[in-house]
Image (cartoon, rainbow, N blue to C red):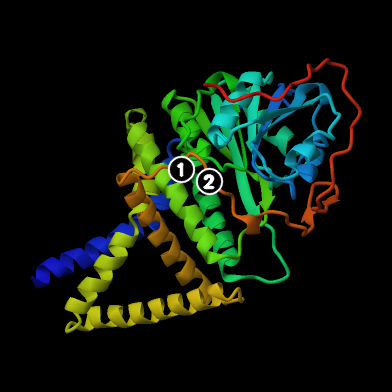
Amino acid sequence: MTRGFEFLFWLGLLWLSYVYVGYPAFLWFIGLFRSFRPNTGDSLYLPTVSVLISARNEQRDIGWKIAETLAWNYPTDKLELLVASDASEDDTDEILKTVSDCRFRFLRLEERVGKNEALNRLSELACGELLFFTDANSHIEESCLRRMVRYFAEPRVGCVTGSEHTIRGDEEFIVTAGTRAFLGYESLVNSLESRLGSVLVCDGSIFCIRKSLFSPLQPDLANDFELPLRIGAEGRAILFDPTAISHEKATTDPHEEFRRKRRICCQGMIGFWRLRRNLHGLRGWQLLSRKLLRWLGAIPLVLILVSSVWLASNRLYELMLVFQFIFYGLVLLGWWLAARRREGSRATTFPFYFVMVNIAALTGVIDAVFGKRFSVWESPQQSRGARTKVASDKHTVAESTFACQALPAPGNHCAELRPEKNRT
């Protein structure tokens, strides 16, 4: 029995060590011998781009988002913006109707269909060679698009993603600080995967693909998970540009963050099962290491704790048990601070966020196994309507809730798009 618990202890420890340290180390090592170097020397490569946004009750953000996007540093005759209002019930539609720039088209969906179906409808209307996906509450710097499209001068590149950064507020709440640390770690892993030309998943707030590689999205999967998996299965390179940054206001509510992580992991688990035939070789190993073993990360935490209790008569395991009592004590303190929207130190932030994310992930996996689906969901309201200033390339963009102003129209003609009824 003792040897069995020793096995479980070291299994759990090696599991977590491999997922968070070993996998990045292996990526770094493989990158020494195998690397993907795209040809990005042609600065004149400026393909046509269609920016797609699915919006649901985004009155606090959609105005500045459209104005900011149409002001990007990109040729006006090569950029179009398409927004689908997914049966919005607030003033989103009224704000959209004020836009008079001919690069903008607006699709009203009378019945709610969910984000992915809205994006499917927009993709059918898009004219660009590239499709750029972003969120209604994401600030993107004005020269970001130019930096991302240069990679597509290399024919082997099928997708490019950027990095999400949280907007730093006056107070550093526990959940916000944890989110920032998590995104920083994800950027590190993305950079290592990008050296191999094989970034596993994209950031949903800022990624771009060739339109020719777009396939209709399944309603209950995450588009930033499904599309790169399909594109990677076709042998196309998927890259990460750390200088392409989107800024978002992170939620401060631990319950909202838990629900968001739970939904993402549920969608990911469903996507893993449905797209498993697209996963082989390097991509299959990446999904196993970066996603599947991490989604199940609460299991090794339990194995380590239970086996440490059983083996506490041994000095080594007794010390490990003491360490875990301290660790979970900090988790509880972090939870108490997060529930009261208070600031915390790294000593409480990281343990709390780490455990919360792992529990949410395992819950999401269980949801997927028992048939729960997320075709539609409500966006966290606390991540909407940010008013903090965000540094841009040449100026500072202040978040507000103003209606879009008309911009000078380019020379090409754009047909007016009328509201569309639901398809049967």
Which three-letter amino acid code belongs to the residue tagged 1?
Phe
Image quadrant of residue 150?
top right
Viewer-closest of 95 and 282: 95
Residues 147 and 78: in front is: 78
Distance between mark 2 and mark 1 Cα atoms: 6 Å
Dots 2 and 1: beta carbons under 8 Å?
Answer: yes
Q: How many marks?
A: 2
Q: Is residue 214 left or right of residue 142?
A: left
Q: Is residue 241 visible?
A: no
Q: Which mark is residue 377?
A: 2
Q: Please report the residue visible at 54 percent of the width from the left and 73 percent of the height from the top.
A: 339
Q: Residues within 10 Å of mark 1 (few under 14, many from 20)?
A: some
* Residue 228 x/y as whole percent: 49, 33
Identify the residue at horizontal 37%, vertical 52% (top origin): 295
Q: Which residue is mark 1?
A: 374
Q: Secondary structure at mark 1?
A: loop
Location of residue 53 in the rendering, given as x and y in whole percent from the top left corner: 66, 35
Q: Residues within 10 Å of mark 2 (few under 14, many from 20)?
A: few
Rendered image quadrant of residue 55: top right
Residue 83 in the figure: left or right of residue 154: right
Q: Residue furthest right?
A: 408
Nearest the eye: 178 or 53: 53
Position of the N terminus by quadrant? bottom left
For image coordinates 55% across by 26% down, the residue present is 158
Q: Tell me if I can see residue 378 in this picture.
A: yes
